[in-house]
Amino acid sequence: MSIAHQFKGKSVLVTGASAGIGRALGLALGRAGAHVGLVARREDRLRALVDEIGPSARATILVGDVSDEEFVSEAVRTFAAEAGGLDLLINNAGISMNGLVEETETSVFQRMMDVNYFGSLFFARHAMARLEQSRGSLIFISSIVGKRGFPTRSGYAASKFAVHALFESLRVEWADKGIHVGIVAPGYTDTEIRQVALGPDGQPRRAAGHTSGDVMTAEDAASAILRAAAHRKREVVLTRGGNFMVWLNKLAPHLADRVAAKVAR
């Protein structure tokens, strides 16, 4: 039995569900019998996902931009009403970038914060009361670059560092409410995030970046995320390469700088 079956009958809201890890989460949870709220901007992909889950799917499609707080508030309210509450929120929606700081438009850095940080903050704030009622869980999806900055990824890294600070703050603030707050940092994952990453001009790069080290499938990442939620883990760093880089940065930061430069090249 897969880890997703532990959420059978539960209500789970997943942001960024149209592709990659979010899509894998929605598929696994839907097939396991959870009522899933699927959040993304691309309605056609969400409807295709519901079709793939199958005829027994209990799913609510929520189309909009996570950086729009009015949409977020309505999405949480709508889903909780249809599902009878909220047991788990997975803040997965995210966008990446690739470009040197001096060559990148300021709007790119702003978009990183709007989607990755404020999108996570808005959903957390509006879901809090319902998660308190269920004594449920909130899982933030971060990145290895949310633990260690990388060249050409500065805007993305900064937004994920902000998400990590939000996680640490809410974990303490919400402890007395009975809400579990956790964070998962995937390493390299085989998704489209690098193809749709913004270039210095703010337009999608439309090209896959070079990958080195361990690469996870979206399905494996989704399983690890659900395991973290099921066991109410505090923080999980995925892939051997990801864990190596985190520890290297703590123990030998100068060497970590050289590794980061090599990866960027």
Image (cartoon, grey):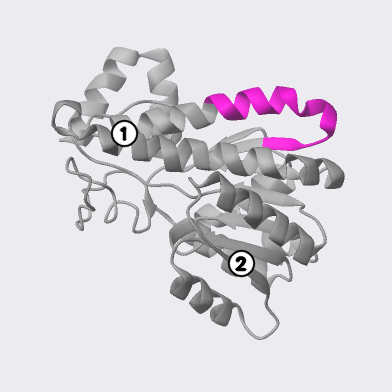
Quadrant where the C terminus is found in the figure: top left
Q: Residue at x 67, y 65 (%)?
A: 36
Camera-nearest residue between 262 and 70: 70
Going 46% across and 43% down the picture, which residue do you hit?
A: 186
Q: Main secondary structure of the magenta part?
A: helix
| Residue at 23% in and 29% down | 151
216 left or right, relative to 179: left
Residue 178 vs residue 85, the one in the foreground:
85
Indicate which disc residue 262 carries.
Answer: none
Residue at x 34% of width, y 14% of height: 253
Give the side of residue 223 with respect to residue 80, left or right.
left
**Circle 1: element type:** helix
Contact between marks 1 and 2 (CB within 8 A): the answer is no
Marks 1/2: CA–CA distance = 33 Å
Which labelled disc corresponds to residue 28? Answer: 2
Which quarter shows the N terminus? Answer: bottom right
Instruction: Say if 257 sits above or below 174 in the image.
Output: above
| Camera-side residue of 204 and 249 | 204
Dot 2: what SS?
Answer: helix
> x and y percent of residue 61 in the render?
59, 68
Q: Which residue occupies the extreme bottom position in the image?
A: 55
Q: Is residue 68 visible?
A: yes
Residue 42, position in %: x, y? 43, 67
Find disc 1 in the rendering and name its residue: 109
Point out residue 132 in the picture as x, y percentages from the top left corner.
82, 40
Observer-side mark, 1 or 2, equals: 1
Q: Disc 2 residue type? A: Ala
**Type of amino acid under label 1:** Phe
Residue 141, can we see it?
A: no
Q: Is residue 39 left or right of residue 260?
A: right
